[in-house]
Image (cartoon, grey):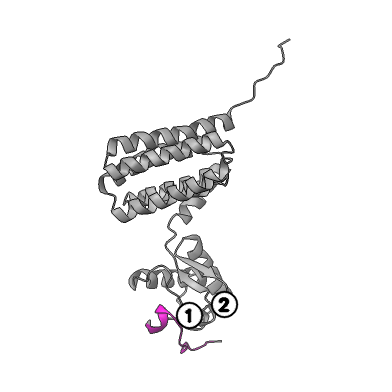
């Protein structure tokens, strides 16, 4: 049964024209393509609201199940996010690392890549990012990094967990390098390694990581690109040592007959 789309929707999409009905392709794929085109063509920003699932079904002349499949495909691509509640809905997103995360996860699951491969990517990306930020970082960017270091320091001092702030320090630094492709790959690798490496429980190791971040922040503020790169290389090397301990094969003590 065909429905006419004459509903008003709230948010940024309210003034947008209704979507045209579909052709002969798979319905959910065409719905996803049309919504993707609207997001890019209208230059919708992250957080802007799209029409509701019911309204989209009416505009496209399809069932809500088809719309749900299309939204799920867009969500996996990092272009939308679905939130529940009064202020929820279908919102535009810019989570461009999502499909990369899925692809890298498949590589790991099939055994085609391992943690050592992820570590090598971090070793390539993050020292470069540190150097870039030292050369071109803004005052507001450095202030944001300083805030993270201060929060990590406070957590460490009273015996709390500083790891989330340390991870966010790395993530922000990668973004601040100013290369969106590098950021998408770098953030994905950082996230996947963080999920797979056990947290540091030693206060000595935690203090060492915090000390490196403080020293790195000093180099960034001074605009010393070479030192910033060197400190980040040492920081990543510490992760490499943890990885080596994690993947080391246990020694056997039995004698050969």
Q: Is residue 11 magenta?
A: yes
- Front residue of 68/30: it is 68
- Pick the quarter of the image with the C terminus: top right
Tally of marks: 2
Seen in the picture, residue 105 relative to 74 is either above or below; the reply is above
- Front residue of 74/128: it is 128
At x 43%, y 46%, the residue is 170
For residue 1, which quarter of the picture?
bottom right
- Pointer 1: what residue? 60
Q: Position of residue 44 (x, y in %)?
A: 37, 71
Q: Gap in Å between the C-alphas at discs 2 and 1?
A: 10 Å
Classed neighbour count for the residue bearing mark 1: other residues with Cα under 10 Å, few (<14), some (14–19), many (≥20): many
Seen in the picture, residue 136 relative to 250 is either above or below; the reply is below
- Front residue of 26/59: it is 59
Q: Secondary structure at mark 1?
A: helix
Residue 154 seen: yes
Classed neighbour count for the residue bearing mark 2: other residues with Cα under 10 Å, few (<14), some (14–19), many (≥20): some
The outermost residue toward the right is: 257
At x 32%, y 49%, the residue is 177
Q: Secondary structure at mark 2?
A: helix
Q: Position of residue 227 (x, y in %)?
A: 31, 35
The disc at residue 215 is none
Q: Is residue 213 magenta?
A: no
Seen in the picture, residue 76 relative to 179 is either above or below; the reply is below
Q: Is residue 201 left or right of residue 221?
A: right
Q: Position of residue 210 (x, y in %)?
A: 46, 40
- Pointer 2: what residue? 64
Q: Which residues are magenta?
A: 2-15
């Amino acid at each position: 049964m065909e429905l006419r789309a004459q509903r008003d929707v709230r948010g940024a999409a309210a003034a947008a024209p209704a979507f045209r009905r579909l052709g002969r392709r798979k319905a959910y794929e065409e719905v996803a393509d049309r919504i993707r085109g609207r997001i890019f063509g209208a230059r919708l920003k992250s957080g802007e609201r799209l029409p509701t699932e019911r309204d989209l079904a009416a505009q496209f002349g399809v069932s809500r199940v088809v719309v749900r499949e299309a939204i799920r495909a867009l969500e996996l691509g990092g272009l939308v996010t679905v939130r529940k509640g009064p202020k929820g809905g279908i919102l535009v997103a810019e989570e461009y690392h999502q499909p990369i995360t899925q692809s890298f996860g498949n590589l790991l699951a099939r055994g085609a890549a391992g943690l050592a491969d992820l570590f090598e990517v971090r070793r390539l990306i993050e020292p470069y990012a540190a150097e870039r930020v030292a050369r071109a970082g803004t005052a507001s960017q450095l202030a944001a990094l300083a805030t993270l270091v201060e929060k990590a320091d406070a957590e460490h001092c009273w015996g709390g967990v500083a790891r989330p702030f340390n991870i966010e320090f790395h993530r922000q630094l990668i973004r601040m390098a100013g290369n969106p492709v590098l950021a998408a790959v770098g953030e994905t690798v950082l996230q996947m390694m963080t999920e797979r490496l056990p947290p540091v429980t030693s206060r000595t190791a935690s203090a060492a990581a915090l000390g490196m971040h403080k020293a790195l922040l000093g180099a960034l503020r001074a605009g010393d690109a070479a030192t910033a790169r060197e400190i980040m290389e040492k920081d990543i090397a510490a992760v490499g040592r943890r990885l080596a301990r994690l993947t080391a094969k246990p020694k056997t003590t039995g004698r050969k007959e």
